[in-house]
Image (cartoon, rainbow, N blue to C red):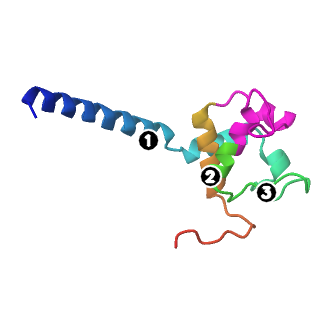
């Protein structure tokens, strides 16, 4: 391999690595921001003070649910075109998440997932 080709390959790989690092850091969740957003958007009003005792049996217990599930659920409420495959059609939740960024959704999901849950949570570490 020529020196010029090798140099270009190193530059390309370095750029790719930096791009992946930036992508990873953009996805890192901020639990404090998630907690702030949960309080600002009044999630406790329907889902309970610890997000573990909803005011109605038709509302889900959120505390301790898997972060990826919570993120995708929030994203589905935010979907512009409600479809049976992707969107969740709920006017209240749609309005609550309408102005939130993708990073906000990650932060909220991470915070809620970190809360203790009354639900059975199997040990997924083994």
Magenta run includes residue 92: yes
Q: Which residue is mark 2?
A: 67
Q: Earlier in the sequence, mark 1 or mark 2?
A: 1
Rendered position, 14 above or below 53: above
Q: Secondary structure at mark 3?
A: loop
Image point 64% across, 56% down: which residue? 66
> Label 1 crowding class (10 Å Cα cut-off): few <14, some 14-19, many 20+?
few
Q: Are marks 1 and 2 in contact (CB under 8 Å)?
A: no
Mark number displayed over residue 111: none
Give how far across and how far down residue 12 sits, in percent: 26, 30
Per the image, label 1 sits on a secondary structure element best described as: helix
Q: Which residue is mark 1?
A: 24
Q: Which residues are magenta?
A: 73-100
Q: Hey, which quadrant is residue 119 in on the image?
A: bottom right
Q: In this view, which residue lies farthest toward the left?
A: 3
Classed neighbour count for the residue bearing mark 3: other residues with Cα under 10 Å, few (<14), some (14–19), many (≥20)? many
Q: Quadrant of the N terminus?
A: top left
Measure the alpha-carbon separation of dots 1 and 2.
16 Å
Q: Which residue is mark 3?
A: 61
Lower position in the chain sequence, tag 3 or tag 1? 1
In the rendering, at what x and y percent does residue 65 appear? 69, 57
Q: Earlier in the sequence, mark 3 or mark 2?
A: 3
Front one among 54 and 74: 74
């Amino acid at each position: 391999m020529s020196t010029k080709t090798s140099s270009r390959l190193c530059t390309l790989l370095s750029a790719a690595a930096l791009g992946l690092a930036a992508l990873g850091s953009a996805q890192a969740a901020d639990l404090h921001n998630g907690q702030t957003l949960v309080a600002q958007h009044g999630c406790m009003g329907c889902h309970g003070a610890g997000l573990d005792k909803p005011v109605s049996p038709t509302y889900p217990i959120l505390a301790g649910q898997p972060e990826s599930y919570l993120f995708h659920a929030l994203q589905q409420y935010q979907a512009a075109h409600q479809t049976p495959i992707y969107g969740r059609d709920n006017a209240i939740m749609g309005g609550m998440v309408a102005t939130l960024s993708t990073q906000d959704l990650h932060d909220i999901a991470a915070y809620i997932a970190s809360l203790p849950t009354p639900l059975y949570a199997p040990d997924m570490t083994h």
